[in-house]
Image: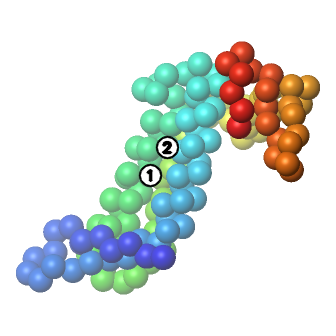
Amino acid sequence: MKIQIPLIGVAGELQFTLIGLGDIVLPGMLLCFLMRYDHTNGSGTMNGYFLAGIIGYCVGLIMCEVIVGTTHIAQPAMIYLVPGSLGSCMTLAWKRNEVKDLWEGLEEHERLLDNSGDETKDGLTYHTGDTEGGKW
């Protein structure tokens, strides 16, 4: 699946470039991880890794669009998106001396490991150990 994006700064006729679904989904998975990592560690949105990843993704996407617009040669956007998004958050982790913690990721959440309150019915597992009594 491809998404058409208008080229910026092209005079005359309106021209488009393509961005693939993978150029959105894969960096989006990284950004979801960074948001969850910030939330787990108690970092706010404005001083965590998520903001660094978003800024890096935007810078990489703008660089890709400018270079494709000026050279008129199709290139994979991931060449610019990976260093932008992953590079920016790893640089921030390096400055904070947290590279090992960020690279190893999050520990498993206790709710995912606790099966004591689960109930299986009709082949579906319902979690009944929560205080609200909800099922999912």
Mark 1 nearby-residue class (10 Å; few <14, some 14–19, many ≥20): many
Check disc 1 and give the amino acid type: Tyr
Q: Residue furthest left?
A: 12
Q: Residue at x 40, y 82 (%)?
A: 74
**Where residue 119 sits: x, y (%)?**
87, 34
In the image, taking residue 1 as reference, residue 133 lies left or right, namely: right
Q: Of helix, strand and loop, which one carries label 1?
A: helix
Foreground residue, 136 or 42? Answer: 136
Q: Position of residue 93 (x, y in %)?
A: 60, 33
Does residue 82 show up?
no
Q: Which residue is mark 1?
A: 57
Q: Name the residue furthest right.
A: 116
Which residue position is annotated with label 2? 53
Q: Residue at x 79, y 26 (%)?
A: 128
Seen in the picture, residue 63 relative to 50 is either above or below; the reply is: below
Q: Name the element at disc 2.
A: helix
For the C terminus, the quadrant is top right
What residue is drawn where x is 47% and y is 72%? 20
Residue 6: tell me if it is visible.
yes
The amino acid beneath tag 2 is Gly
Q: Are marks 2 and 1 in contact (CB under 8 Å)?
A: yes
Q: Give x and y (percent) for residue 12.
A: 8, 81
> Which residue lies at the image location 91% right of the left edge and 26% below the top edge?
116
Question: How is the rendered protein coloured?
Answer: rainbow
